Amino acid sequence: MLNKRKTLILTIVLFAMVLVLGAVGTVHYYSANQIHYTVNDTLPDGNGKKARVVLLGGQSNASGCSLDEYLQKNVSAEKYAEYASGYDNVYINYLSGMKLSQAFVKCSTLQGELDGGFGPELGMAEKLNELYPNETFFIIKCAWGGTNLFEQWLSPSSKGKTGKLYKSFVAFVQDSIKYLTSKNYDIQIEGMCWMQGESDSFSVEASNAYGEHLENFIKDIRKKFSKHAADDGIAFIDAYIAQNPIFWVYYEGVNQGKTYVANLSPLNKVIDTSHLSCIKEPEPTPDIPHYDSLSEIELGHLFATNLATYF
């Protein structure tokens, strides 16, 4: 039997969320599950300040299933206090599965899909703050556990039925950008970080098609948001899925697809994540599909440092 956390790999629970109306924002429906969201007004006027935007998408290791309780055990009290208080120059608007921020808030702990969980955004914020303490960043995160590129994230250029998550991702990013623009921030989208592919490793067909679908996905995202792209274009920072044939049966096909896409453009990169751990937490029965807390932090560091090479 799969435990409750592992079911994130196989299915999306169908729910409805209560509409929360904010002072500023455009309401959209998360069409897969009829989630309602708005972008509440939480930011001061930007007065033309330059701000870098980073998009974050994917499935559970992007949405956030690493456990905060283990992060607290694995870092110093001072470091955890820093994580918990958030970063004054790094904000996030997130849709992490059924969890929504409903606004741009400081990037901090507990912003993951799982109760008590966090995603790579925390390590990203830490590293971006370290590298660029005097710059402002906005992370726009839309990710959902157990979802695939073969159907749910499928973009228009793949010629099939456009995926509901692709549509929702685009709508969520558009509304977030609309809000930032209304607050007079001079924004540019530097890049997108992508942690996804596990659910495409369940079949030969999906894993073999991964490279083609990912190539189309990136092309469509760049076209959709070209108006706000950085001068050199929107970078795409990808990451390999774990080499775990017990869970990710056809992982080799997915990772080969990622390698293929990384070689198509100097704006594309893929991160080798083979050293990251999924075997320690929680005790005594590790949740092997999901990164341990420190590995999730490192994934965020890797995303940020690779993205920074394009600044």
Image (tube, rainbow, N blue to C red):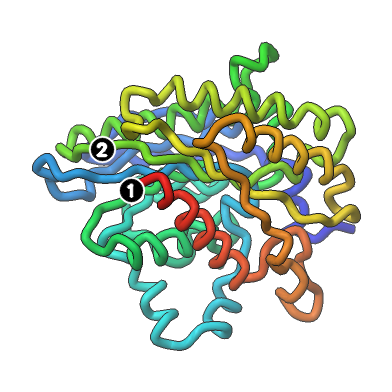
Q: Which residue is drawn at 40% across and 66% down?
A: 126
Q: Most extreme residue toward the left, as rendered?
A: 47
The amino acid on which the numbered mark 1 sits, given as a three-letter code, is Phe
- Residue found at the very far top of the displayed protein: 159
Q: Viewed as shown, does residue 217 lie left or right of 249? A: left
Q: Which residue is drawn at 65% across and 24% down?
A: 154
Q: Where is residue 261 in the image (x, y as percent from the top left)?
A: 65, 33
Dot 2 or dot 1, earlier in sequence: 1
Given residues 273 and 87, the one toward you in this image is 273
Please give left or right for residue 248 compared with residue 295 in the image: right
Residue name at image x 48 percent, y 40 percent: 192
Quarter holding the N terminus is: bottom right
Q: Is mark 2 on a helix, strand or loop?
A: strand
SS assignment at label 1: strand
Q: Which mark identifies residue 187? A: 2
Residue 125's tag is none
In percent of width and height, residue 299 lies at 57, 60
When the figure is inspected, residue 133 is found, relative to residue 55, above or below; the finding is below
Give the residue at mark 1: 138
Q: Mark 2 and mark 1: span between their CA atoms?
A: 9 Å
Give coordinates of residue 216: x percent, y percent.
Answer: 61, 22
Q: In which quarter of the image is residue 109?
A: bottom left
Amino acid type shown at disc 2: Ile
Q: In which quarter of the image is residue 114?
A: bottom right
Q: Is there CB contact under 8 Å for labels 2 and 1?
A: yes
Residue 25 position within the rendered picture, expressed as x and y whole percent measured from the top left:
28, 34
Residue drawn 57% across and 85% down? 73
Judge whether residue 63 can be spotted in this image.
yes
Answer whether residue 144 is visible to the viewer in this image.
Answer: no
